[in-house]
Image: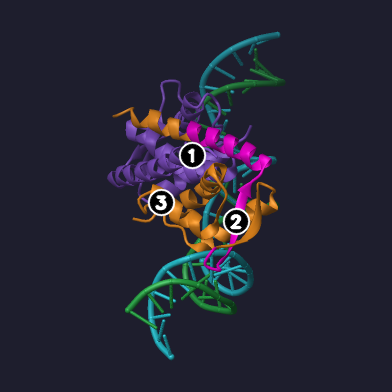
Chain colours: A purple, B orange, C green, D cyan
Amino acid sequence: MTFPKDLVAASATPIILAVLQGRDTYGYAIIRKVQQISDHRIDWKEGMLYPVLHRLEAAGLVESYWVVAENGRRRKYYHITAAGRSEYRALIDQWSVVYRALCSLSEESP
Amino acid sequence: MTFPKDLVAASATPIILAVLQGRDTYGYAIIRKVQQISDHRIDWKEGMLYPVLHRLEAAGLVESYWVVAENGRRRKYYHITAAGRSEYRALIDQWSVVYRALCSLSEESP
DNA sequence: GAAGCATACCTAGTACTGCTATGTATAGTA
DNA sequence: TACTATACATAGCAGTACTAGGTATGCTTC
C-alpha cells in the first residue's frame, strides 16, 4: 500500500530534519535510513528527495558540502543549521499535536 | 504559531474521519471539537473544512443528512460510511508509521 | 575489458491542490 | 435595531510537488 501524496509531501521536511539533527549525511543514505526505520513503508525516490533538500538549503535550514569517500565517490553531505534545528523543534511539536489529536479521537468509539 | 499549510492539509482528512468514526456530527461542531482536543493549536476555518467534507462525500467516505435542531437551526450532519472506516484505518496506520519514524529519529542525538 | 547493476545527484514537464476571503442566511444577545 | 454567533457555501487566487528519465561513475560478474 502506498502512502497518500499529501502525507508523503507533508512529512518529508520534518523527517529529513530529524535525520540531520542526528548527524550529517548524504541524500542516498537518507533514503536508505528512512526505508530502514519504516520497514520500507516510506519509500522515497531520489526525484522526491533532492528537490526537498534543495528547498531546505535555499531556506537556510540546511547547508551542504562535498566529500569524496574512500572509494572515490563524491557525496553531497547535508548539515542542519541552527535555523534548521529551531524549525525542526517547531515541526516536531506541531506533528505531535496533530498525532495526539488523532489518537485522542481514535479512542472515542461509536 | 500557525501550522504549516501542508500539515494542515494532510491531516484534515484523517482528523475528520477520526471525529466521525466516533459519532455523527455537523461541520461547525467538528471545528469546535478539533479546537478543543488540540487546545486551539489546530484552528480550522469553515472555508477550509467544508471543501474537505464535500470531497470526502464525493469520494463516498461520508454521507450527509439535514437535521433541524431544537432551536430551529438547520444542520448538515455527517456519517462515516463503511468505505470511510476502512480509509480511516489505513490512514491511522500510515500516520503512525510516519510519526514513529519521526520519534525514532528524534532519539538519535548528535 | 565489457556489460550490467548499484550508487549518487539532478531537474523539467506534467499534473495537479488548496484555502482565504467573503458570501448568504438566521438565531441569540444587548 | 445592531451586533455577534452559528451554519453552510464557494471561487478566485495562489500556488505545490514529483514521476520519469537524465548524467556520471564505482562495483561486480563474466
Residue B93 among magenta residues: yes
Marks 3 and 1, the one that precedes in the sequence: 3
Vertical comparison of B85 with A60: above or below: above
Total marks placed: 3
Foreground tag (3 vs 1): 1
Q: Write the residue at 54% across / 64% down.
A: B70
Q: Residue A108 carries which label?
A: 1
Q: What element carries label 3?
A: helix
Amino acid on which disc 3 is placed:
Ala
Residue C26 at x, y percent in the picture: 55, 75
Q: Nearer the viewer, residue A44 or D6?
A: D6
Farthest residue, direction front: B70
Amino acid on which disc 2 is placed:
Tyr
What whole-number distance in Å separates the C-alpha atoms at marks 3 and 1?
A: 43 Å
Residue A66 visible in the picture: no
Query: Label 2: which residue?
Result: B77
What whole-number distance in Å separates the C-alpha atoms at marks 2 and 3?
A: 45 Å
Q: Write the residue at 69% across / 48% down.
A: B60
Residue B89 at x, y percent in the picture: 58, 35
Region rendered in magenta = B70-97
Q: Nearer the viewer, residue A23 or A13?
A: A13
Q: Residue A58 carries which label?
A: 3
Amino acid on which disc 1 is placed:
Glu
